[in-house]
Image: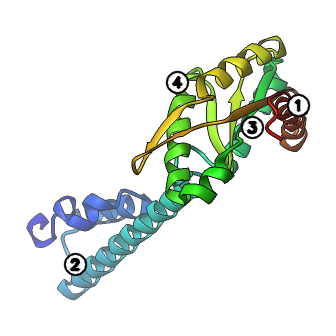
Amino acid sequence: MNEQFPNFKQHESYQQATGAVTHLAQDILSRINQEEHIDPEEREMIVDVLTFAIEAEKDLIVQRDRVERLQSLSTIDEVTGLGNAQAFNQAFLRAVSAATRYGDPGIVMRVEIANLDQVMQTYGSLACDAMLRSISQRLQCEIRNSDLASRWQNDEFALLLERCPLVFAAPKAERITEALEGLRVHFDGHTLTTQVVVGYAPFGAGSTLATAMSAADRILYEAKINAKLN
């Protein structure tokens, strides 16, 4: 009796589809194989139905994978490869939830490239992309593995530092500024240098991203004034 049915485990559709429908099809085939008297036409119809079910589930799995891929791409900044504002917002919500549960405060930072508009006007968008990539790479070297760097706006990055008390904010902002300020970026025979300002604000239980980023923006604005970049 077993020889009269196809080996579904060797079937390409079976190998690519691993969901409930495929497992159910396997179970049905197993039950049928135990039956001694089945009309050949009924057997053929059952096999056709099970094949169709497996193919349909395979298509659904492919579509699901595509949706997941698109969702992943929707949170990635295509220039720097970092998370974008949407990804940062999601991470912030998780961080606030953790801060509410465990009582550990954190810090958000805004890192602005003060001369990016000037680079755009002088050298164009490709030069801006080169500068953004260089800064994003250097920025990731200046933060902990547990911290998050994201592309926040056109000329800004955002940092999420969990379990980091406010007392460490100013020293960290100063260190990041020193690491990124005057960074040399080579583009099309030109050497570009960066101008960077950093703002920061604490967050904790009940914090909202809008409030935290607004507070960080005020510190950033003060830094621009002190650096005479405004």
Horizontal and vertical percent for residue 80? 52, 46
SS assignment at label 4: helix
Residue carrying label 2: 38
Q: Residue 141 shows which numbered tag?
A: 4
Residue drawn at x 48%, y 39% as measured from the top left: 185
Q: Is residue 186 left or right of residue 129?
A: left
Crowd rating for badge 4 (residues with CA inside 10 Å; few <14, some 14–19, many 20+): few
Q: Earlier in the sequence, mark 3 or mark 4?
A: 3
SS assignment at label 2: loop
Under mark 3, the amino acid is Phe
Task: Tell me whether circle 1 and circle 3 mark residues in contact (CB < 8 Å).
Answer: no
Whether 64 is drawn above or below 175: the answer is below
Residue carrying label 3: 92
The residue mark sitting in front, 1 or 4, is 1
Determine which quarter of the picture holds residue 211. Answer: top right
Under mark 4, the amino acid is Cys
Residue carrying label 1: 222
The residue mark sitting in front, 3 or 4, is 4
Under mark 2, the amino acid is Ile
Crowd rating for badge 1 (residues with CA inside 10 Å; few <14, some 14–19, many 20+): some
Horizontal and vertical percent for residue 66? 46, 64
Q: Earlier in the sequence, mark 1 or mark 3?
A: 3
Q: Earlier in the sequence, mark 2 or mark 3?
A: 2
- Colouring method of the image: rainbow
* Distance Cα–Cα, label 1 vs label 3: 24 Å
Determine which quarter of the picture holds residue 205. Answer: top right
Under mark 1, the amino acid is Glu
* Distance Cα–Cα, label 1 vs label 4: 25 Å
* Distance Cα–Cα, label 4 vs label 2: 68 Å
Whether 106 is drawn above or below 137: the answer is above
